[in-house]
Amino acid sequence: MKLDILAFGAHPDDVELGCAGTITKEIKNGKKVGIIDLTQGELGTRGSAETRAQEAAKAAEILGVQVRENLKFRDGFFVNDEAHQLAIIQMIRKYQPEIVLCNAITDRHIDHGKGSKLTSDACFLSGLRKIETQLDHQPQTAWRPKHVYHYIQWQDIRPDIVVDISGHIDTKVASVLAYASQFYDANSTAPTTPISSKNFLDSIEYRAADLGRMIGVAHAEGFTVERYVAVDSIFNLI
């Protein structure tokens, strides 16, 4: 199955928090999108790997993605080495995306920056024909995405491009709330975490609204890029 967009996240819920608005907008526009989670989020303070798997499946259904897979790397301890790169290369060659979305280039959680660099490196290596991979005992063809964009997470990174997601914020928030064990619940007795506060939950919408304000729309999501973004005409800018 060839996809238009393949979104990677170090943990289940990274993609929803970082770029769910962009994903759901493109799905509504007829694009095919998939999600690859690098870990099961097993070190998370609240919930369990099993709970996160159920929540991730629910979020995928809300977003309407074509496929979601989990590579089951070690949460907190995966590294950027050949074995991990090859596992991601297999996914890139399997789905042949035009665009890859991945973790923030640097962030509060160490897995986010690591996942960002690991995925970016694998995108480059995936285009090298002399790196041979197989899937289901069949050789894969080299494939390099046209663009790699990094979404923004905890840190307030200045974006290089901003995507208008007006009309899609409710779907984004619903996909985040699918992770019921992780986020604000006034009746929960689970330990508090930096993302379990009401302020954090509210920030999903107000950060999108603030980015939207900067470009004159209701809501937006920001991304950093690895190379210049070109346009056919300056009249295409909004």
Image (cartoon, helix red, strand yellow):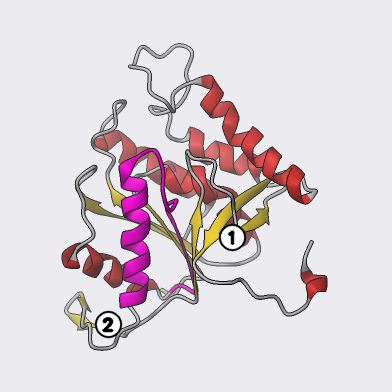
Which quadrant of the figure contains the N terminus?
A: bottom left
Q: Nearer the viewer, residue 141 or 210?
A: 210
Residue 218 image-quadrant placement: top right
Note whether 118 is above or below 12 in the view shown.
below
Disc 2 is placed on an element classified as: loop
Q: Is residue 86 left or right of residue 57?
A: left
Residue 212 in the image: state x and y as whole percent.
72, 45
Q: Can you identify the residue that label 2 sits on?
A: 140
Q: Is residue 178 magenta?
A: no
- Residue 37 visible within the image: no
User: What type is the residue that disc 2 sits on?
Assistant: Gln
| Image point (31%, 46%), residue name | 111
Label disc, if present, on residue 129 of the rendered structure: none
> Disc 2 versus disc 1: distance between alpha carbons?
26 Å
Residue indicated by mark 1: 27
Q: What amino acid type is highlighted by mark number 1? A: Ile
